[in-house]
């Protein structure tokens, strides 16, 4: 396993459980490939990402 493998796993699990792609991509520090959306959208989705990460932590513990 590599460090990047954990990122793949996290992305897959979160997508499979219906979390917003924008939250997941932001958490993984991915840049939006749509340059126009990237220019206009400065949201950080902190509330949603916090809930997502709490869910993921519980998922890993269980």
Image (cartoon, helix red, strand yellow):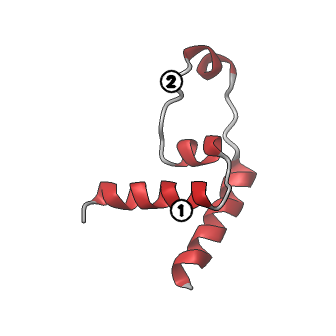
Q: Residue 55 location, x and y as percent?
A: 65, 69
Q: Nearer the viewer, residue 61 or 14?
A: 14
Which residue is depicted at the point 54% across and 42% down?
25
Which residue is depicted at the point 56% across and 42% down?
26
In the rendered image, the vertical position of residue 14 relative to residue 34, given as above or below: below
Residue 28's tag is: none
In the rendered image, the vertical position of residue 61 relative to residue 55, given as above or below: below
Q: Secondary structure at mark 2?
A: loop
Q: Nearer the viewer, mark 1 or mark 2?
A: 1
Question: Which residue is the extreme one toward the front?
Answer: 16
Question: Which residue is the extreme one toward the top?
Answer: 36
In the rendered image, the vertical position of residue 25 relative to residue 50, given as above or below: above
Residue 13's tag is: 1
Q: Secondary structure at mark 1?
A: helix
Q: Residue 29 location, x and y as percent?
A: 48, 41
Question: Which residue is the extreme one toward the bottom?
Answer: 62
Residue 41 in which image quadrant? top right
Q: Nearer the viewer, residue 4 or 29?
A: 4
**Left or right side of 40 for 8:** left
Question: Which residue is the extreme one toward the right?
Answer: 47
**Left or right side of 18 for 2:** left
Callout 2: few (<14), some (14-19), or many (20+) C-alpha neighbours within 10 Å? few
The residue carrying mark 2 is 33
Q: Nearer the viewer, residue 38 or 9?
A: 9
Q: Residue 58 location, x and y as percent?
A: 61, 78
Cα–Cα span, label 1 and label 2: 22 Å
Q: Earlier in the sequence, mark 1 or mark 2?
A: 1
Which residue is depicted at the point 66% across and 40% down?
44
Which residue is depicted at the point 49% across and 31% down?
31
**Left or right side of 8 for 46:** right
Q: Residue 45 location, x and y as percent?
A: 70, 44
Q: Where does the N terminus fall, quadrant-wise? A: bottom left
């Amino acid at each position: 396993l590599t460090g990047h493998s954990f990122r793949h796993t996290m992305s897959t699990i979160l997508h499979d459980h219906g979390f917003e792609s924008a939250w997941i991509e932001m958490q993984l520090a991915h840049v939006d490939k749509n340059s126009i959306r990237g220019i206009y959208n400065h949201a950080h989705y902190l509330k949603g990402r916090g809930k997502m990460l709490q869910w993921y932590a519980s998922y890993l513990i269980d």
